[in-house]
Image (spheres, rainbow, N blue to C red):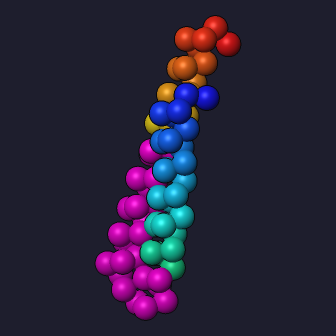
Amino acid sequence: MDKDAEKDIVKGKAKQVEGKVDQGIGKLTDDKGREAGGWAKEQHGKAQEGVGEVKDSLDGKNDGR
């Protein structure tokens, strides 16, 4: 796996966890802004993870896999 792709995947997963935590805190404290921000952060993490997976897939095609 390409280091750049791996970096995107790991960062994306971390952002998803951060987002879920923020959503949970927002729900517990009835803070709709924090809840919405957490959802957005989670979605950004999913997108970043997807970018990493695409990079990895393209790297595999270039290696002749």
Residue 37's spot in the image, x, y percent? Answer: 35, 69
Q: Residue furthest front?
A: 3
Q: Is residue 50 visible?
A: no
Residue 45's spot in the image, x, y percent? Answer: 46, 53
- The residue depicted at 52 percent of the width and 58 percent of the height is 14
In-image side of 22 versus 59 (left or right): left
Quadrant the N terminus occupies: top right
In the displayed structure, 44 sits above or below 2; it is below
35 vs 3, nearest the viewer:
3
7 vs 42, nearest the viewer:
7
Q: Residue furthest right?
A: 65
Q: Is residue 38 magenta?
A: yes
33 vs 12, nearest the viewer:
12
Residue 60's spot in the image, x, y percent? Answer: 61, 18
Q: State the count of labels.
A: 0
- The residue depicted at 48 percent of the width and 33 percent of the height is 4
- The residue depicted at 50 percent of the width and 41 percent of the height is 7
In the displayed structure, 19 sits above or below 44; it is below
Q: Is residue 63 visible?
A: yes
Please tell me whether the stretch drawn in magenta is mainly helix, strand or loop: helix
Quadrant the C terminus occupies: top right
Q: Residue 2 occupies which quadrant of the picture?
A: top right
Q: Is residue 54 magenta?
A: no
Q: Residue furthest bottom?
A: 29
- The residue depicted at 49 percent of the width and 50 percent of the height is 11
Please state the extent of the stretch shown in magenta in the rendering.
Answer: 25-49
In-image side of 37 versus 55 (left or right): left
Residue 46's spot in the image, x, y percent? Answer: 49, 50
